[in-house]
Amino acid sequence: MTATTGRLTTTDVGPRQSAPRPSFAHLTRLSDDTGLFEHARHAIVRREHGYCTDDVARGLVVTSREPEPTEPVLRLAERYLAFLTHAQDAAGAFRNRLGHDRRWADEPGLGDWWGRALWGLGTAAARSPAAWIREEALVAFSRGATRRSPAPHAMAFAGLGAVEVLRRHPAHAAAAELLTDAATTIGTPGPDPLWPWPQERLTYANAALAEVVIAASQLRHHGPPLDDGLRMLNWLRDVQLRNGRLSVVPAAGWRRGAVRLRHDQQPIEVAAFADACATAATVTGDPVWEAGIRQAVGWFLGANDVGTRMWDPVTGGGYDGLTPHGPNLNQGAESTLALISTLQYARRWP
C-alpha cells in the first residue's frame, strides 16, 4: 500500500490466510508536524487529547524497522525523533504528555514512556537507513540509558532499545549495563509449572518481559539462561491459545489464582507476542515461534475469539480493542502501531 491511497494490498501467505502489507496511511493521518496524536474517533483524529511520548516512541520503532522506507515514512521517523529529543531532559528522563497547544502537562520521569522512548531511539540508532537519524538517536539513547526505573515494564522496554543498540554497536557499555539491569529487574521464572511468571500478575505487553530475558541470554556474558526466557514465553503462549487461536490476556490483566477474563483484548498484547516470537525464532531457529508470529498476524485478520477482523481495510488503521461484541472501531495510535508492527513480520515469516 502507498501512503497516499490508504488502500491495503495483500501478499499470499499460503492456505492459512492472506496478510495485508504494512500500511502507514493511517499513521500519517494521525501525525502532524509536531508528532503523533494519541486518539481517534473511528478514523478521525481527536486533537484535544494531544500527543504522548509512549506512542511517538512506538512510531519511531515501526518507521525505523521498515527496510526500504518511502520518503513519507522517513519523514515520519524524523518527526518522531525530533519529538523524543524535545521530550528528553538533560539528565535522560522524558516527559510524556504534550497538549495540542504544545505545552507539556507533566514533568520528566522514568515511567513506561522513558522505556519506550529508549526502545524507539535504540531501534532508530540501529536500523534507520538515514545516517543523521542514527547518529542523533544514539546520542539521545546514550543519555537516557544512564537512568533506571524500578518498574519491570519500563525496564523491559528500555532493554529492548538496548538490544537494538548492542546488535549494531556490541561495545556500547551503557546499553550492555542497561540490558543486564533490565533482565535482573524482570526476574527469573518460578518453579510452579502452572505459574512460572516472575510476577504475580500478567498486565500488559507481557511478552516483552520474556523477550528481554531471551535477548539478554544471547547478548550478555553471564546473562540469564536462555531457558528462563523461553520458559516464560512458552507458558505465555500456552495460556494465550484457545482452540488454536490467539486469545491474549485482556486489559484488566490476570492475577495468579483468579478467574481470567476474555475481554477486552488489546492489540498491544498481540504485537508484543509477535515481537517476542520473532526474537525467539531468530535465536533458536525453532519453527514453533514462526507459528506464533502467524497466530499474531491471524488475530488481526479474524482468527480471534470473536472471529472478526481487527483492522480497517479502507483506512489502514487498527481497531482499538476486541470486545465480546466485536471490535472497538476507534483507530488510535497504539492499535494502529500494533497492527503495523505485527504485519511487518509477515514479510519475513509468511
Image: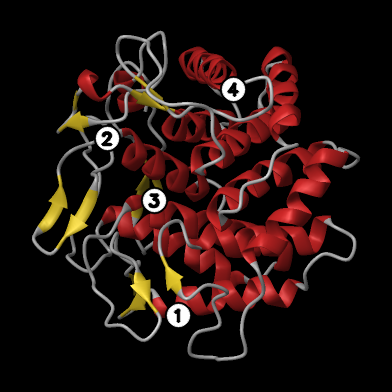
Identify residue type, mark 3. Answer: Ile
The residue at the far front in this view is: 107
Identify residue type, mark 2. Answer: Gly
In x, y percent, where is residue 192?
A: 56, 91
Report the residue marked by disc 3: 268
Report the residue marked by disc 1: 238
Tell me what residue is drawn at x 18 percent, y 38 percent.
Answer: 330
Give the vertical position of 190 relative to 216 (above or below).
Answer: below
Lower sequence index among marks 4 and 2: 4
Give the vertical position of 216 relative to 172 (above or below).
Answer: below
Q: How many residues crowd around disc 1 within 10 Å: few (fewer than 14), some, or many (20 or more)?
A: few
**Of discs 1 and 2, which sits in the foreground?**
2
Task: Give the total number of marks visible in the rendering.
Answer: 4
In x, y percent, where is residue 284?
A: 71, 68
**Of discs 4 and 2, which sits in the foreground?**
4
In x, y percent, where is residue 315?
A: 23, 29
Q: How many residues crowd around disc 2 within 10 Å: few (fewer than 14), some, or many (20 or more)?
A: many
- Distance from disc 2 to disc 3, alpha carbons, whole Å, reads 12 Å
Disc 1 + disc 3, Cβ < 8 Å:
no
Lower sequence index among marks 4 and 1: 4
Give the vertical position of 41 relative to 32 (above or below).
Answer: below
The residue at the far left in this view is: 325
Of the 4 image quadrants, the one containing the N terminus is: top left
In depth, the one of 345 and 212 nearer the eye is 212
Give the vertical position of 146 relative to 51 (above or below).
Answer: below
Lower sequence index among marks 3 and 4: 4
Report the residue marked by disc 2: 332
- Distance from disc 3 to disc 4, alpha carbons, whole Å, reads 24 Å
Q: How many residues crowd around disc 4 within 10 Å: few (fewer than 14), some, or many (20 or more)?
A: many
Disc on res. 299: none
